[in-house]
């Protein structure tokens, strides 16, 4: 019976693991593992005996994938990390996404430069997925501020949704064999064409198992006052699809900013979605007062949930993979900050408490009940 | 000092014997060795020797295109190969090749 909450926390200086009993009163922290090396992606793989994975993105010595089979008491490198074929011409810069695939050992991995890899043996060997990695568009994508990264992998039977910054949303309906750009209604603020076929700076995509046709997207917003070619593009930052990602519409009205990075769906209610609006210039919350914003009607309206969070003078950023939500009956949200705090929002974000306040800058937070 | 394989010239007895100093964080990829003794005419040949005989170490030094990783420096004696002839820098018997992380990496 699942009875513990486990958190993986990817930071600039390695991965930490925290766990707690179900009431979540006190979390024990261990780590860092892969000390001193940035960790942009983690995965808590709950298929069978739980395994934890972390990308270890070493600026000196290249990429590694770390794996723990003892709930984060120790980590070891897998036998290999994703790598491009020698004649490809591209070299791995970073690992941005690790997701569970089919069966018990398949893993999917999104990397920089934006490409997809798949492992059939729990991360010991990796194959490039050519349908997207060698897509006709692949050499035309441009790096965003964080690099040219494939950061979102969502599997839904034979459908696969990918988020690429800056490439946009790509959809496969044949299990990942072929992909097509699927960005109708997804705006871009940094190009003359406000609605290009591809090249949008998608920040994160989320969905709910009970509503597979519904997807939510945090896009690169903040273009309401744009005066360049094509004119202003208000509200392109927070979007929703109701047709499996074929088309998208804005749900940003009511938010203080349509710019942000993470977007998270409530585990028991596909209509409840959370974002962290940020000011585009500073990448911090409006008025330097951090807040999560919640919609309980699929984005038709939004409310601020910030009880317990600092009320002023807080300039941290919550990055694209630094917020998650557990699956308990009254779920808790968790987010990590670029200033090294890990916050828990109990009762779906009603009450916030700081679990750890002096970690390294946090890139990634994942939670599971195990 | 751990002897490794040799390049094609070495098998003919003509490649100079050199020493590669391995930085601490990479010794786990070559059985803990701090130094490797190989024979190679050039830095490129030395890297090819590592690729053949110390594959795990090589993957930490060069990316999948064969390029020396951006935040690593290689020195031949006291000179950075970037200031010499890059990986085509020739080696002489007794040369010491040192691999070091650059400060640029963070």
Image (cartoon, rainbow, N blue to C red):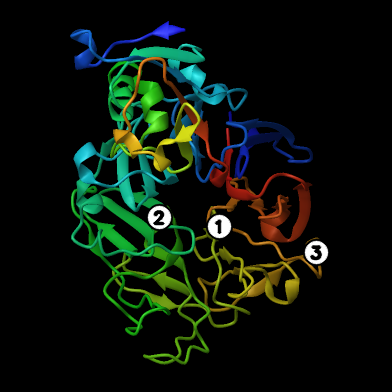
Residue for point 18% across, 53% down? A178
Q: Are marks 2 and 3 on the same chain?
A: yes
Q: Is residue B106 above or below residue A32?
A: below
Residue ID for mark 1 = A266
Residue for point 47% across, 37% down? B72
Q: Quadrant of the N terminus of chain A?
A: top right
* Residue B81 drawn at (x, y percent): 40, 36
Residue for point 44% across, 64% down? A144
Q: Quadrant of the C terminus of chain A?
A: top right
Q: Earlier in the sequence, mark 1 or mark 3?
A: 1
Q: Earlier in the sequence, mark 1 or mark 2?
A: 2
Q: Identify the chain of the residue marked 1, using the numbered disc in the image.
A: A
Q: Is residue B34 above or below residue B71?
A: above
Residue ID for mark 3 = A310
Q: Secondary structure at mark 2?
A: strand
Q: Earlier in the sequence, mark 2 or mark 3?
A: 2
Residue ID for mark 2 = A149
* Residue A39 drawn at (x, y percent): 54, 42
């Amino acid at each position: 019976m699942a009875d513990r909450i486990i958190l993986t926390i990817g930071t600039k200086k390695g991965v930490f693991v925290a766990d707690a009993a179900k009431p979540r009163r006190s979390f024990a922290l261990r780590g860092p593992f892969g000390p001193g090396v940035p960790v942009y992606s983690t995965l808590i793989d709950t298929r069978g005996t739980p395994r934890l994975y972390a990308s270890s993105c070493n600026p000196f010595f290249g990429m590694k994938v770390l794996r723990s089979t003892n709930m984060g008491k120790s980590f070891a490198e897998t036998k290999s990390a994703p790598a491009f074929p020698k004649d490809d011409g591209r070299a791995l810069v970073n690992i941005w996404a690790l997701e569970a695939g089919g069966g018990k050992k398949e893993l999917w991995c999104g990397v920089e430069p934006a490409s997809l890899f798949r492992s059939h043996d729990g991360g010991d060997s990796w194959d490039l997925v050519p349908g997207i990695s060698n897509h006709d568009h692949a050499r035309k994508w441009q790096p965003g501020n964080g690099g040219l990264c494939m950061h979102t992998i969502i599997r839904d039977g034979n459908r696969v949704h990918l988020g690429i910054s800056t490439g946009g949303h790509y959809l496969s309906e044949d299990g990942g064999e072929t992909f097509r750009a699927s960005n109708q209604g997804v705006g871009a603020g940094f190009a003359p064409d406000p609605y290009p076929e591809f090249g949008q700076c998608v920040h994160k995509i989320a969905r709910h198992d009970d509503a597979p046709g519904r997807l939510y997207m945090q896009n690169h917003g903040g273009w309401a006052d744009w005066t360049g070619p094509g004119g202003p593009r208000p509200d392109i930052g927070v979007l929703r699809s109701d047709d499996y990602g074929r088309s998208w519409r804005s749900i940003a009205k009511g938010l203080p900013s349509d710019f942000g990075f993470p977007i998270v769906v409530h585990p028991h209610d596909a209509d409840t979605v959370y974002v962290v609006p940020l000011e585009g210039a500073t990448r911090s919350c409006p008025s330097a007062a951090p807040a999560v914003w919640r919609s309980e009607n699929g984005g038709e309206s939004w409310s601020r949930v910030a009880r317990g969070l600092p009320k002023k003078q807080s300039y941290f950023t919550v990055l694209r993979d630094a917020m998650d939500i557990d699956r308990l009956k009254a779920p808790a949200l968790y987010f990590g900050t670029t200033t090294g705090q890990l916050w828990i929002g109990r009762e779906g974000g009603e009450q916030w408490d700081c679990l750890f306040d002096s970690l390294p800058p946090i890139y990634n937070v994942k939670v599971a009940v195990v | 000092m751990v002897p490794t394989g040799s390049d094609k010239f070495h098998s003919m007895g003509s490649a100079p014997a050199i020493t590669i100093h391995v930085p601490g964080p990479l010794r786990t990829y070559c059985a803990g060795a701090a130094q490797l003794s190989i024979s190679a005419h050039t830095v490129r040949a030395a890297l090819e020797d590592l690729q053949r005989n110390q594959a795990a170490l090589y993957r930490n030094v060069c990316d999948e295109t064969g390029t020396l990783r951006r935040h690593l420096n290689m020195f031949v004696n006291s000179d950075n190969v970037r200031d010499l002839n890059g990986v085509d820098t020739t080696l002489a018997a007794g040369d010491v090749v040192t691999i070091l992380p650059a400060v640029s990496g963070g």
